Amino acid sequence: LAKNIVGSGVLALAAGVGAFSGARVAIVPALALLFMMCGLSGYTFSSIARVSAAVGASSYRDAWSKVFGQRSAAFPNAAIVFKTFVGCLAYAIILGDSAASMASLAGGTGALAAPNLWIGLISTCILLPLCLLRDLSSLSVGSIIGTLGTSYTAIFMAIRCLDGSYAAGGARAALIPASARPAFSAPVGVLGGLNLKSLVLVSMLATTFLAHYNAPKFYTELAAPKKGPKLASFNKAVAGGFGLAAVLCGSIMAAGYLTFGAASSGFILNNYATRDALAVVARLGIFSSVTFSYPLLFFGLRDGVLGMLGFNAADDKTHRIATAVLMGVVNGLACVMKDLGLVTALGGAILGSTIVYILPALMALRTSAKNKADGKAPLLGPAETAFNLALLPFGASLALIGAIMTLKGAAH
C-alpha cells in the first residue's frame, strides 16, 4: 500500500515549499499540511473499503454502481481510467529517461542513450510480466524493493542535508550550476511566510496520497484475521501504509527543502551533482520505486477499461490480451509524447481530488442513508456524516485550486 501511494511525485514536494517561501521555518507548516492531507486521504481510502464491504463490491466502479446504479458508473470509472492512464504514461516516460540518463553516465552512447530503446526493453522484460500478475499480493516483494529504494533516497537526502556539502562553500557546491544551489531568505510574516502561493503545495498534496482506485482490491485480497472483524484489520494496514507513506514523503520534502530552499527543483534529484556517488544510487532507488509503482497503477487502469467495455476481467485470455494491448498503447505513446501537456495536468488535478475526496464521501453518505431507510444500522454516525458532508466542498475547493495552479503554471 505504501508503495502504491509513494511515486515519483514525492520528489516535487520540496519545490512546492519553495514556491511560497525561502525561509527554513517554512518546513513546519508544510509538514503540518502534509500529515493533515495524508490523514484525510487515509480516511477516505478506508471509507471506500467500508462501502465495498457493505454492498459486496470488489472494485471502485462496482462499489459506485451498487450504491448509485449502473448508469452513473461511467463518470467515476472514466475519472479512474484517465488518472491511471496518465500516471502510467508519466511513469513510462520517467523510466525511459532515467534509464537513458544512467546509461549515459555509465558511458553509453547512441542507441544505449536513447529513452525509447529503454522504454521498449523495460516494458517487455519487466513491466509486462509484472502486469500480467493477477493480484496485488504477488507484487509484495517488488513493493518492498521499491519502498527500500525510496527509503534509501530519503536517507541519502538527510545525509546531504546534515553534512552541508551543498551549502555555500561546501565540498559539492561547485559541482552544480548556480541555479541549483541553495537559496534561503529570512522569514516574512507568520508561519514561515505562509501565503497564497502555498496553494501550490496544497495542490500537490491533494493527490500525493492517491491510491483509492485500488482500495476495494486491497480489502478483498486482505486475509481474514483470526480474531476480530476484517475491516478493523484493514484499517490497521491502512494506518501503517499511509503512515509509512507520510514519513517517506515528509522526510524527502524536508531534506530536499532544507538543503536547497527556494532553489529546489521540481525533480529534487536534479539539484544533486551527477558526480555525487550517493545521488547516483538514489536515482537507481527511485528507478526501482517507479518500476514497481507502475503495475499498481496499471491494475487500476486495466480494471477500469475492462469495466467500461463490459468485458469479463476473470477470463484469462481477456486478461492477457487487455494487458498487452493497454501496455502497448500507453508505453507506445510514451515513445512519442515527452510532455504530457496542459490537458492531462488540468484533468489530473481536478479528477484526482474528485477520486480521493468527493466520490468516497458521496458513496459513504448514500450507503449510510440507504441502510437507515432499510432499517439497518447506518454506515456513518452523526459526527462522521457531518465530516463527510464537509468533505464535499473541501474536495471541490481542492479541485478548483489544482485547476487554478495548473493554469497559472502554464501561463507562466
Image: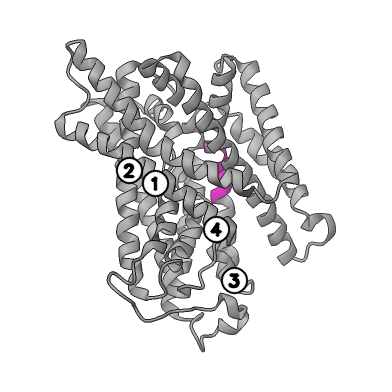
- Quarter of the figure with the N terminus: top left
Labels 3, 4: front one = 4
| 379 part of magenta stretch | no
Real-space Cα separation, disc 1 to disc 3, in angstroms: 39 Å
Q: Position of residue 243 (x, y in %)?
A: 33, 49
Q: Image quadrant of residue 357?
A: top left
User: For the residue labelled by badge 2, is the local secondary structure a helix, a strand or a loop?
Assistant: helix
Mark number displayed over residue 409: 4
Residue under pointer 2? 394
Residue contact between numbered discs 4 and 2, judged by CB atoms under 8 Å: no
Looking at the image, residue 99 sits to the left or right of residue 403; the answer is right
Q: How many residues crowd mark 3 within 10 Å: few (<14), some (14–19), many (20+)?
A: few
Question: Along the polypeptide, which appears first: circle 4 or circle 2?
Answer: 2
Mark number displayed over residue 277: 3
User: For the residue labelled by badge 1, is the local secondary structure a helix, a strand or a loop?
Assistant: helix
Residue farthest to the bottom, as pictured: 169
Residue farthest to the right, as pictured: 110
Residue at position x 63%, y 74% from top? 275
Identify residue type, mark 3.
Ala
Q: How many residues crowd mark 4 within 10 Å: few (<14), some (14–19), many (20+)?
A: few
Identify residue type, mark 2.
Phe
Real-space Cα separation, disc 4 to disc 2, in angstroms: 22 Å
Q: Position of residue 119 (x, y in %)?
A: 72, 46
* Magenta stretch in the rendered image: 289-296
Real-space Cα separation, disc 3 to disc 4, in angstroms: 33 Å
Residue under pointer 1? 398
